[in-house]
């Protein structure tokens, strides 16, 4: 890719592709490879593109080696910023990436997913055509090849538009949010509440932009995933109360659409999904009532399974 100035190119907004990456992430190279294909299509559309990766956690990790190799061989001199923070916290990495951004738009992508090559072009087209939109978010496509009943139950809600920022991949106007509270368990939920409260159309779901991921495959992993989500919701409500900001629902559940779309064969999956959510919510509420923070550990099945197409 050419060294285009990171301002405006051919009337298109320049974009930073930002990746917060935990130091124990084993396959960030696959994500960066997929983003490289996205970047090529963005540049063909007229966008100047820069990569920025923040590895958070211990230094000297295999993930950092993968990122540095990408910076040397794939991006070319000056094309990739490699940031490091020893705090293993995604919100801290997010803040570092946002502070280093010097482009009008910034796309955040998780380090364990695979965006489709045209995904960011579709997000850019949507954000460009909707001036009221602050963030355009991609659709999650689960890899269910050989998946069991737990993975299928975990993936069920991603079939629907819940009006939220989907953390694995989204493109936003970089001036919209300058900093998020560090230590968040649910960063995309915080963004959904923060940006969604700014008016109709602020969060734009783009169904044609696809990012592939692997859902949790075991009941224990799925419960830990939901426990993190439910604890994150409690944390967000508390943070907003401290700021004197009214609390509202983070997601919009289209119940009528869901009931029409889920047939009898999927009722057991829906029951499992709702059951795990309910138990996780109770567990998170009890932990919050007792004043204990719910710790979150990486779901290894999500990290070790290759998305579809690989």
Image (cartoon, rainbow, N blue to C red):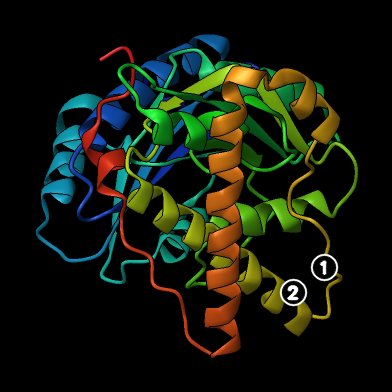
Q: Quadrant of the N terminus?
A: top left
- The residue shown at (46%, 55%) is 100
Relative horizontal placement of residue 132, taking residue 192 as reference (left or right): right
Residue at image point 77% right, 80% down: 241
Quadrant that contains the C terminus: top left
Spot occupied by residue 130 in the image (x, y as percentages of width and height) = 82, 26
Q: Quadrant of residue 282?
A: bottom right
Label 1 residue SS: loop
Which numbered disc, 2 or 1, marks the residue that appears first in the sequence?
A: 2
Which mark is drawn over residue 247? Answer: 1
Going by the image, does 170 lie left or right of 252?
Answer: left
Q: Is residue 23 above or below residue 216?
A: below
x%, y% of residue 267? Answer: 62, 28
Tag 2 residue? 240
Q: Work out whether residue 122 can be spotted.
A: yes
Residue 31 drawn at (x, y percent): 31, 30
Furthest residue in direction right, as rendered:
200
Taking depth in this image into account, of 269 and 124 the one nearest to the observer is 269
Residue 104 can be seen, yes or no: no
| Depth order, front residue of 229/266 | 266
Left or right position of 168 against 86? right
**Percent position of residue 117, x then y:** 43, 14
Q: Which mark is residue 34?
A: none
Q: Are marks 2 and 1 in contact (CB under 8 Å)?
A: yes
């Amino acid at each position: 890719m050419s060294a285009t100035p990171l301002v405006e190119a051919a009337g298109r907004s320049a974009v930073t592709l930002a990746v917060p990456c935990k130091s124990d992430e084993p396959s960030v190279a696959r994500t960066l490879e997929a983003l490289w294909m996205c970047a090529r299509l963005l540049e063909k559309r007229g966008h100047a593109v820069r990569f920025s990766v923040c590895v958070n956690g211990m230094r000297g990790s295999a993930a950092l080696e993968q990122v540095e190799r990408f910076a040397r061989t794939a991006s070319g001199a000056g094309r990739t910023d490699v940031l490091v923070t020893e705090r293993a916290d995604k919100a801290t990495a997010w803040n570092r990436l946002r502070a280093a951004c010097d482009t009008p738009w910034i796309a955040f992508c998780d380090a364990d997913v695979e965006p489709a090559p045209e995904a960011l072009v579709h997000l850019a087209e949507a954000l460009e055509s909707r001036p009221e939109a602050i963030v355009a978010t991609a659709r999650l496509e689960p890899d269910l090849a050989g998946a069991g009943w737990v993975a299928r139950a975990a993936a069920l809600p991603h079939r629907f538009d819940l009006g939220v920022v989907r953390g694995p991949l989204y493109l936003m106007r970089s001036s919209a949010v300058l900093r998020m509270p560090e230590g968040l368990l649910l960063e995309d939920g915080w963004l959904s509440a923060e940006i969604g409260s700014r008016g109709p159309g602020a969060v734009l779901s783009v169904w044609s932009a696809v990012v592939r991921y692997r859902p949790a495959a075991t009941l224990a992993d799925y419960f830990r995933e939901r426990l993190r989500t439910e604890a994150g919701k409690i944390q967000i409500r508390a943070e907003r109360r401290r700021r004197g900001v009214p609390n509202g629902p983070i997601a919009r559940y289209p119940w009528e659409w869901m009931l029409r779309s889920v047939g009898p064969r999927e009722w057991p999956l829906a029951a499992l999904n709702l059951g795990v959510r309910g138990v996780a919510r109770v567990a998170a509420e009890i932990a919050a009532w007792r004043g204990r923070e719910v710790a979150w550990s990486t779901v290894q099945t999500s990290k070790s399974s290759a998305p579809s197409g690989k």
